Image: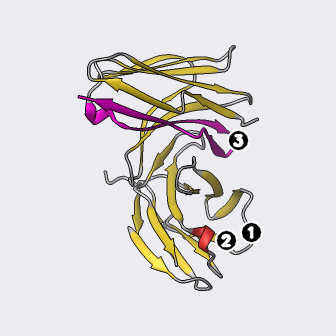
Amino acid sequence: DAGVTQSPTHLIKTRGQHVTLRCSPISGHKSVSWYQQVLGQGPQFIFQYYEKEERGRGNFPDRFSARQFPNYSSELNVNALLLGDSALYLCASSLVSYEQYFGPGTRLTVT
Amino acid sequence: KNEVEQSPQNLTAQEGEFITINCSYSVGISALHWLQQHPGGGIVSLFMLSSGKKKHGRLIATINIQEKHSSLHITASHPRDSAVYICAVGRTNKLIFGTGTLLAVQP
């Protein structure tokens, strides 16, 4: 079985732009979580989705939004990008909420 | 005070040494994860445990629920073990991460 996949691997955006990051969970997993990892820090929880509904939200501004599709894949959207949004964005899928499997991440650079 | 604390923050070892990384947490958890992250890379899950001890190759993870403490041990360390090791606790619907331990194993 394929693991969690994320796309793109890397991308560079300029301040004020919008970005969409994508995640495909492990087959059979219905929950997807998103994390932001700023360089030198541990990951921070952004969102969790289960069965297309938001089940949790971290302390992030409304510029961050996400959704989950009927096939359980997910998108993370960030509007009005700031330099501080530069980070590794990690997606994790799970069958049960506490057992999460991580994707390779998308490295976003905002210039 | 962070809900998940790791020590040490940085660790340098010689190849072949026995390594211990510690994690303490202050909240109720459903499970604890040990994760590995190579520089610039994604996160790989090493262990998930809610009690006792698990072993995989040269890696051993233990957890003491009463003391809210976990340790990750690496036996016969090798330079390829050099990475950041992160402790994360599962709480309700999310993971809370420690800040990581940067391990460098020198040949």
C-alpha separation, residue under disc 2 versus residue under disc 3 = 21 Å
| Residue bearing mark 1 | A61
Secondary structure found at label 3: loop
User: What residue is rendered at 49% in x and 66% in y?
Assistant: A73
Q: Where is residue A25 shown, x and y percent of the image?
A: 45, 58
| Residue bearing mark 3 | B92
Q: Nearer the viewer, residue B33 or A56?
A: B33
Mark 3, Cα crowd under 10 Å, few <14 / some 14-19 / many 20+, is few
Q: Amino acid at mark 2?
A: Phe
Q: Where is residue A54 shown, x and y percent of the image?
A: 69, 61
Query: Would you place residue B49 above or below residue A35 in this image?
Result: above
| Residue bearing mark 2 | A64
C-alpha separation, residue under disc 3 versus residue under disc 1 = 21 Å
C-alpha separation, residue under disc 1 versus residue under disc 2 = 6 Å
Q: Nearer the viewer, residue B50 or A51?
A: B50
The residue range painted magenta reads B79-107
The picture quadrant where one finds residue B16 is top left
Secondary structure found at label 1: loop
Q: Amino acid at mark 1?
A: Pro
The picture quadrant where one finds residue A50 is bottom right
User: What residue is rendered at 56% in x and 57% in y?
Assistant: A38
**Which residue is most to the left?**
B107
- Closest to the camera, between mark 2 and mark 3, is 2
Q: Amino acid at mark 3?
A: Thr
Asked whether B33 falls inside the magenta stretch, the response is: no
Using residue A91 as the reference point, say whether residue B18 is left or right of it.
left
Chain containing the residue with disc 3: B
Q: Is residue B71 visible?
A: yes
